[in-house]
Amino acid sequence: MNQLKLHGLLFVGLTSAFSVQAETKWVTVAKSDGSIQCESSGISPIAMKEYLVQAKIPAKNARCGNNGLFYTAVCGAKTGRLNLFDIPAQKLRAASKLGFQRLRAWPDASETECEEEAAFAGNAAEISINGIGPAVDEDAYRKVRETIGEAVAENVISRFIVYGYGIEGGFSGCVQEGSFVEPNAFSDFIKKLRAINADPNTTAYSVTAVEKCETSSPEIGGVE
């Protein structure tokens, strides 16, 4: 009887272990970057990652690839370029609704070097960093605040507006380029923000270009 009970406990333990392992398994998904020869450079992995983040799908290791298919070299034709991400296996169905597929859907696909991302062309950006259940990634949150603080001190941004604070920590807000800044200073600031890696298991983080920060408040010499 005791031996049967022991075997039963071992079975339950192993089942639980395999269940946890399945829940934490990461798989690679891909989606066309939408690039068109001579017409469009497509969407960068960093920008596309925001689609997953906004859908509360943890994503890591954003990188580039090619589907391995042949496309005629002519303006207006597709390029075959892909954006690749690692997501939890249990989020595949949610990702598929956004157009992402398992990388194995393209048998001849391969990873490639990403083309250099174009300079940020907007004059403002909305920033969102919030905990998605667990508390927000404190290290990433601190880096975001420090990066914004440096931009304020160097007059790279003339407006920083906080829209609200997250229940699990973090905030959402908007930053706007200053009137008299060095060329590319604002785009370099945005690159620094986008280079911050927040833990996708705890935090939803995005930096999105907008035309301007929507507010009736006056401009600042520091922070609003």
Image (spheres, rainbow, N blue to C red):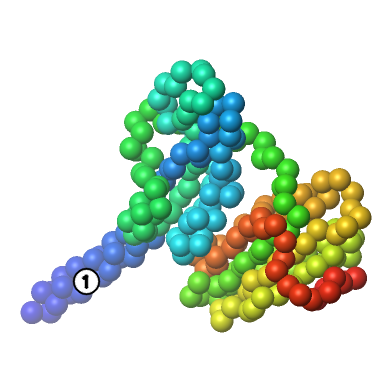
Q: Is residue 41 above or below residue 71?
A: below
Q: What's the residue at 28%, 61% (across, down)?
A: 18
Taking the view exactly as shown, the residue that stands out farthest to the top is: 73
Taking the view exactly as shown, the residue that stands out farthest to the front is: 216
The residue closer to the viewer here, 142 or 46, is: 46
Q: Is residue 49 in view from this perspective?
A: yes
Residue 23 image point, x, y percent: 35, 62
Residue 206 appears left or right of 192: left
Q: Which quarter shows the C terminus?
A: bottom right
Where residue 101 sits, quadrant-wise, is: top left
Q: Is residue 50 above or below residue 36?
A: below
Q: Which quarter shows the N terminus?
A: bottom left
Q: How many marks?
A: 1
Residue 111 image point, x, y percent: 49, 33
Residue 95 appears left or right of 145: left
Taking the view exactly as shown, the residue that stands out farthest to the bottom is: 167
Q: Callout 1: helix, strand or loop?
A: helix
Residue 166 appears left or right of 71: right
Q: Is residue 103 above or below residue 155?
A: above
Residue 84 appears left or right of 219: left
Where residue 176 sits, quadrant-wise, is: bottom right
Residue 116 image point, x, y percent: 67, 36
Taking the view exactly as shown, the residue that stands out farthest to the left is: 1
Residue 59 image point, x, y percent: 49, 55
For the residue marked with disc 1, what is the amino acid? Val
Q: What's the residue at 89%, 65% (across, down)?
A: 153
Q: What's the residue at 71%, 75% (across, down)?
A: 162
Q: Is residue 146 in view from this perspective?
A: no
Q: What's the residue at 39%, 48% (across, down)?
A: 99
Q: Crowding at label 1, few (<14), some or many (≥20) Cα neighbours within 10 Å? A: few
The residue under label 1 is 12
